[in-house]
Amino acid sequence: SIDDAVSILNHLRKLFSISDSNEQKRLLTMLPPLWGRDRMANWFGGSEHQAQHSVDLRTAGGIFSKPEDRRGNKSLDEQIELTVHNFTLKK
């Protein structure tokens, strides 16, 4: 029903508002390709920069593709972080 669709859309907006920047960019990739940056940013309440980045993501990897980490150092795996953290607590 229309009410169900509206509820789903409102939940998506809520998810966007509580997500980190990378997840917000992923969510923006699901919006229609014909929408411009302004409309994309306004619909979710994000920035034009996020909208542009999400267009690039969608073009390169499709809907819900993940942003590439371009920092020089790669993040540690969560399990490794936990192991190191637990090790330092023992001392």
Image (cartoon, grey):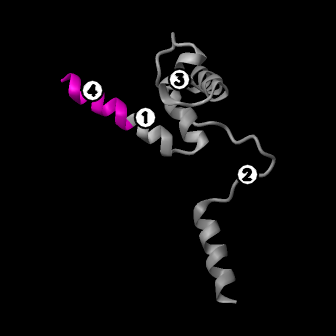
First in sequence: mark 4 vs mark 3: 4
Picture coordinates of residue 88, whole percent (x, y): 69, 81
Secondary structure under badge 1? helix
- Residue located beneath label 2 in the image: 74
Label 4, label 3: how many angstroms apart (C-alpha)? 19 Å
- Residue located beneath label 3 in the image: 42
Q: Is 15 above or below relative to 88? A: above
Span shown in magenta: 1-11
In the displayed structure image, the side of residue 71 where residue 75 appears, left or right: left
First in sequence: mark 2 vs mark 3: 3
First in sequence: mark 2 vs mark 4: 4
Q: Circles 1 and 2: CB distance less than 8 Å?
A: no
Secondary structure under badge 2? loop
Q: Circles 2 and 3: CB distance less than 8 Å?
A: no
- Between circles 2 and 3, the one closer to the viewer is 3
Disc 2 crowd, CA 10 A, few/some/many (<14, 14-19, 20+): few
Q: Nearer the viewer, residue 63 or 17?
A: 17
In this view, the residue farthest toward the top is: 34
Within the image, what quadrant is residue 76 found in? Answer: bottom right
Q: Circles 2 and 4: CB distance less than 8 Å?
A: no
Label 1, label 2: how many angstroms apart (C-alpha)? 30 Å
In the displayed structure image, the side of residue 10 where residue 48 appears, left or right: right
First in sequence: mark 1 vs mark 3: 1
Secondary structure under badge 3? helix
Picture coordinates of residue 41, whole percent (x, y): 56, 24
- Between circles 2 and 4, the one closer to the viewer is 4
Label 1, label 3: how many angstroms apart (C-alpha)? 11 Å
First in sequence: mark 4 vs mark 1: 4
First in sequence: mark 1 vs mark 2: 1
Amino acid type, residue under disc 2 in the picture: Lys
